[in-house]
Amino acid sequence: MRISVNYDQCESNGICMNIAPDLFEIRDDDFLYVLNETPDEDRREDLEDAVVRCPKQAISVSE
């Protein structure tokens, strides 16, 4: 699976980082960074939670 972020929609509010800090990070520049664009299958549950809980629906997962 592959994580994609629509940075035009992303508010960098940190919800995804709180759910999966090993996959997402907001740095001092207040921008969201994907730390691992192709996580292992065992990260799917948290990743799907981050996708659903993103208020701007800026995160997606493709296979």
Image (cartoon, helix red, strand yellow):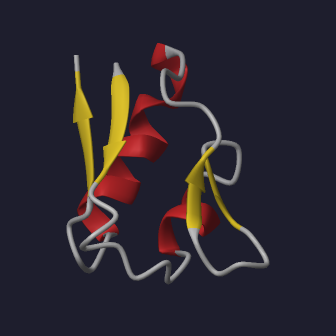
Placement of 58 over or under 1, stated as above or below: below
From the top left corner, tell me how far across and down residue 45 is, in percent.
41, 38
Q: Is residue 10 left or right of residue 15?
A: left
Placement of 9 over or under 52, stated as above or below: below
From the top left corner, tell me how far across and down residue 48 is, in percent.
32, 45
The number of discs equals 0
Which picture quadrant has residue 7? bottom left
Which residue: 61% across, 43% down?
A: 23
Quadrant (top left, top right, bottom left, bottom right) of the N terminus: top left
Quadrant (top left, top right, bottom left, bottom right) of the C terminus: top left
| Closer to the camera in the image, 37 or 41 | 37
Q: Is residue 29 left or right of residue 36?
A: right
From the top left corner, tell me how far across and down residue 2 is, in percent.
36, 25
Which residue: 62% across, 68% down?
A: 18
Which residue: 50% across, 30% down?
A: 37
Placement of 23 over or under 41, stated as above or below: below
From the top left corner, tell me how far across and down residue 17 is, in percent.
60, 63
Q: Is residue 1 left or right of residue 21?
A: left
Placement of 50 over or under 30, stated as above or below: above
Which picture quadrant has residue 3? top left
